[in-house]
Each structure stands twice: as structure tokens, then as C-alpha cells.
Amino acid sequence: MTRTRGIHGWLSALAALALWEIVAQIYPNSFVIAGPLDVLRHMAENTGLLSRAVTATLHNAAWGFLWGNLGAIILSCTVILLPRSERTISLLALTVFCLPLVATGPILRVLYGPGNGPQIALAALAVYYTTYLALVVGLRAIPQNWSDLTRIYGRGRMTELFYIRARASLPYLIAGLQIAAPAAILGAMIGEFTGADRGLGVLTLRAMRSLDVDATWALASLAATVSILVYGIIGWIGRRLVAHPASILMTPPPVQGRENWSRSLGKAVALIALVLVLWHSVMDIFDLNRFFAKRPLDIWRYLTTNDEARSTLRTALTETSALTVPGYLAGLGLGAGLAILLTLVPALSATVLPAAIALRSVPIITTAPLIVLALGRGAAGTIIIVAVMIFFPTLIACLQGLRQTPGQIIDMFDSYAAGRLRLMRWARIPAMLPAFFASARMAIPAAFLAVTTTEWLATGKGIGNLMALTATTSNYNMLWSAIVVVTAAATLAYLVVERIERAILRVYASEQVQG
Amino acid sequence: MRCSPMSGAAVELNGVSKVFGTGDAKVDAVAPLDLMLKAGQTTALVGPSGCGKSTVLRMIAGLEDPTTGTVQIGTETPKALARRGAVSMAFQDPSLLPWRTLHSNIALGLKLARKPSNPDQVNALIDLVGLSGFGDRRPAELSGGMRQRAAIARCLISEPELVLLDEPFGAVDAITRNRLNLELPPLWRDRGTTAVLVTHSVQEAVLLSDRILVLSPRPAAVVADITVDQTTIPVPNTPDFQRVCDDVSDALGAVAA
């Protein structure tokens, strides 16, 4: 079975390569596409340059991976040891994850200077949240009896964490690390976009500016291949370490009754205050220069006294939202739709699935320059980049979710000869919902990242472009204002999706627990 | 292994009750209970499903705090006893850690009880529960009955003063259950350890216990208190054995009616 799937995977990959070459041959000198042969030729002619760039990017990604995951492990263990801290830690972690890398990159560049600091910091920022979520789920996922076993001997949470939870969560940690590895490469590359002197990101930027199609395709292929390899290697190590890999759905924590709106509002205000205090204190503690390290009050003063700034920000945010929302919805819809289709017609999945699993591990943004080359700098290109960025993780998560349908329920439908469509509508889709919503939440920061990066690198519109422009003109008041607006929008969107998720899952919870 | 005989601790419940939730979601799980369980005796709690037997057990273990009343074990609170590593519990599910070997799972009982590791003691107990030669196997390689033997061994390795058994043989087949019922209880009984057993099986309760408390449906209250003379009764299928089983069944039938 595995071998058949492997052969299908190889055949699909070969077919894709052949198709790619044929299309490239049909459109020679199109300034849009370079075929696999051109890509290989470019790689052969620039082996030294490319291998130095890959080494630099991997070096930074590896350090970011290490620091980011270390942070995730510390945060998730804190949440387990001090359960009351969970809501605050989770929301702070989410807020930091929603920071637009496009803007934090230039600021980190000013802070760190020309070294590797920004690349490593952005790689760490890109990985910590997914590992944190996966690990919290894993650390919690132990049977009640195992927890009682330590409590019966009068031992506390630390003993439970050490003897039981840490080892039990290993499959989840590995699954989290697997998702984190390509994200670290993505973070490092975005860090390189901000003015590093070597790395795949630097070469990508150079190739795009000189409209070097062969180089752009070669770099995108290289980044994708390296990401798939790293993803595969961590998966391989994981399979050696744990017998049963975890399928992570990252469902929200159980709701303790219904929370009223005034209480939620109170908590939100407290959290915002905490973020502002932390922001201010960190800058004061490290004595960061007020010229580029703006404090919350500076931004408040800037925005309340400057009508033009507010209007510029509003226009940019409107432009960005007009691309983010359709791309986000299209990506989610296509991902869930294809998952449903593949479940209804299993014969298709043998061909589509290996490619989807491979492409899930590609930081799609590294291929964004190709989509811009193909579709131009208009709205369609950006929307497609967002959709593609979200599509693969959603597809894989939804396929996993559709498989969660309890076997007895499937048997019951079969006993009535209900047919695949009814089974899908009444049993499989409800079982898929936790996975769907988990990816819908995770897709929000990804969507903002895709749009802002594309605006920055290619389209010259929206808040991504505004951030890039203000970074180069040292208009740090506007840059920080843009960071606040994008972070707030992404966090708010995340919390709205989480609320919808809870309302819907409450209805379907009984079906879920039977799984 | 023949461990030094230990004296068990008496268990005293004074007006102990448990209420879960508040408002519309409020559930009265256990009505105020006054009980005195003698040191060194095995007491069985039987009653209809969901009546609160396990909640009583968990309050004795210190895993749940009573809403009212106090639990005292000897002269200590359950949590103080737990901190000394003097109480242990076996569950319906053996709850062995799948990544540890059988030996290491049993040794975990010593570690958690803050007692020095003693591989010889672990090996001796493995022999005593009939698992000789399986010490380096992992739980997935053992049968259900073997896992349950290992769980009981983990429970006893720390030589506790109080053993709590929450349907420990409920998940194994009838033949294995009968064998475990005959072979394992002497391990704690001979040491004079106090034991509290929750079970659905009337025969098991009569076979293992010195005293059987029949609980009413929720909120749990004691409706029958039956003494079993273990010097004469514990031979299955004898008229005396059957008579006590009938008494327990009648009490259960009365609360179910």
C-alpha cells in the first residue's frame, strides 16, 4: 500500500515536471516561465553561488528554528504548570505571531545592523506559534488516569510534566517541528529580503528586480526542494522516535460555560493594556532609540494629530483587506472542497495527495514571484498567492478531519445504503469541522503575510507597500502605526473565527466525542 | 517477595458530600456520608451506575475535595497521606505508560512515592504477580490480564497503607477476572493494608471484601452495610457465599426499584 502510494508520488512528480517543461517549451522567451531544463542549467552554472546561499539561509533558519521552538516549549510548559496563565500567554503569543514580518523585518534590521540577527529572529517568530499550539494540545492529551496516577502520590504538576506529559507529547512535538521547519526557512528568507548580504532571499530579490526568469524559477525550485527535504527529514526522524504520529487538529480548549460579552470585553481591554505596557517596558528596558523604536504613546499622538496619516493608513488597509478576504475565503473553500472531492472519489487522491503533502511543506511565499511573473501585478495575482498559501494546509487538515468520522457511524449509514453524498453531508463534514476551523484560524496570519509580502515585493499597493516605503524613508511613526493596524486586524479576525468555531463546534460536539 | 507486614490506616468520613457544578448544571453526587472503615479491612462500594461510588473513592484518595465534611485517614488528611506516598490506586484501565517497560512501569510507583529505587524488590513483585520473564516487555506486548497484574504490582510496590481499587478487573474477560480475583487480593490482604474497592460485580465484592456498602442512586447514600466473614465465606459457589451474594443483590434490587 505504502509502496503503491510511493510509486504514485514519483509518477505524479515526473508528470508534473514533464508538463512544466512542455508549457515552458510552448512559451519560450515569455518572461514568465522557465522549464526544468533551464532551471537545472541555471543551477549548474551558479552552483557555488547557490550553495553558499542555501548554506546561509539554512544556517539562519536552523538558529531561528532552535530559538523559536525553545520559546514554544517554555511557553507551553508554563501553560501546563500554571493553567491560569493560559489565556494570557496564548493571546500574547497570538499577538506576536500576528506581527507583520514585512514590517518587523526592517525594524530588526535597524536594531541588529547588517548581521544575521533579523533572519534568525524572523525565522524564530515564524515557527514558535505552530509548535506552541501543537505542544499544548500534546501536553494536554493524556488520559485522566495518568494524571491521577501522579496526584494519588501527592505529586504536583512538575512531576506529572516530567514523568508523563513530556514523553506523551513527543508525537505532537514532532508534528509541530515538522510544520515549523519550512516556516523557519520562510522566516529566514523574509529576513534576507530586508537587506542581508547573502542567502536565498537576497538572490530572489535580485532575480526579481533584474527580471531574470531562469534565476527566479531556479531559486523558487531550490527553496521548495530544500523545504520538502527538511520536512521529510524531520518526519523520518519522528517516525524512528515514536510509533504513532499524532494527527494534530488544534481544536480550541473546552469552553467553561458561556462567557458574556461584557466579561470578554473586560478581558480584551486588560490584554490590550498588557500588550501596550509590555511594548513600552521592553523598549525602555533595552533603552532603544526613540527615533525608530516608537512607544505606544508616540503612535497614539501621531495618529490622533495627523489626519493625512490616518487617511493613508485607512486607504492602505482597505486595499489590503480587499485582497486578503477573497484570497482567504477562496483558499479555505478550495482546500475544504478538494478534501471533500478526494474523499468522495478516493481514486483521485492517489495522484493528488502526494503532491499536496509535498507542496504543503513549501513556503508558498517563495514561489510568489513566479505567480506575479505569470499573472502580473494586479489583484488576481495577489488573491491567488493568498489562496495558494492557505490551500494546502487546509486540504491536508480537512482530509485528516474527514477521516475522523467514527467507523460505527459510517457502518450505520452503510446499513441504510445511504450513499456517499448523504454520508458526507450528515456525518463526514460535521466530523471535519474541528480540523477546518483549526486551519481557518491558522490561515489568518498566513493570509496577511502573503498579501503584505506580495504588496511589498511586487504590487506596490496596500499596507505591505506602505510598510516597505516607510521603512526605506525612515518614517517610523507610520511604520509602527501600520504594524499596530495589521496586528490588531489579524488578532481580531482570529478571535472572530475562534468565536464562530466555538459556536458551531458546540452544536457538533456530541458527534466529535464519539470519535 | 514477602514484605514486612504493614498496618493499614483506618478511613473516616465525617459528613462528606459532593456537589458538582452550580445553578442549572448543579449535580448532587454524594449525600452527606458518615463512615468508619477499619484499618486492615477491605471494603467494597457497590451501587447502580453513576451513583457516585467512584466520587467517594476519589474523595478518599484526595483527588476530589468534598463539598462538605472531612476525610481522615489515620490521623492525617488524604493529601498528607499522599505526600508520604502511603496511598496508591488502581483503575479499570491499567494506565501503564506505553513507552516504559513493565519493570519500569512498576518501578514508577516507587519513584512517585519518593522511595528509593529497588530493582530487586520490583523483580520479586513481578514474580509474585505471575509475570516472571516479562519485565522488559512493553504494555502493548502484554495481554489485558497481564497489564492488570502489572497495574496492581505498581500499586503495591510502594507498600502503601491504603489501596484504592476502582473496578480494577472490570476490563478483562470473565475467566481472567476470576483468576485475578483469587490470586491478587492476598497480596494486599496479607500485609494488613486497608483497601477500598469499587465494583459492579456482586461476586467480586463478596469474594474480596470484609464489608460491603450498597449505595443508592445519586446522590449516593449507604442503604445496606453487609459484613462478610472472610474466614468462612470466600469459597465461590457454596451456600454461604450465595447467601451473602443474595443479600447484596436484594439490597441493589431495592435501590434500583
Image (cartoon, coloured by chain):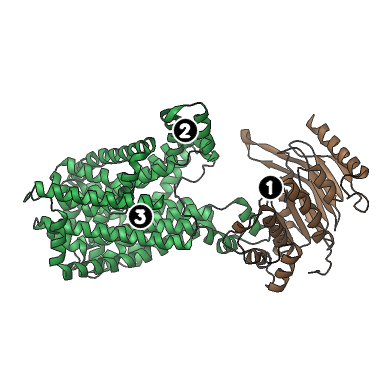
Chain colours: A green, B brown
Quadrant assignment, res A332: top left
Q: Quadrant of the C terminus of chain B?
A: top right
Residue B198 seen: yes
Relative to A122, residue B222 above or below: above
| Marking on residue A427 | 2
Chain containing the residue with disc 1: B
Looking at the rendered structure, whether the residues under marks 1 and 2 are on a common chain is answered as no
- A87 and A253: which is toward the camera: A253
**Residue behind mark 1:** B171
Of callouts 2 and 3, the N-terminal one? 3
Looking at the rendered structure, whether the residues under marks 2 and 3 are on a common chain is answered as yes
Relative to A161, residue A29 above or below: above
Horizontally, residue A38 falls left or right of residue B180, namely left
Q: Secondary structure at mark 2?
A: helix
Say which amino acid is labelled 2: Ala
Q: Secondary structure at mark 1?
A: loop
**Residue behind mark 3:** A96
Residue B25 location (% of width, % of height): 62, 35
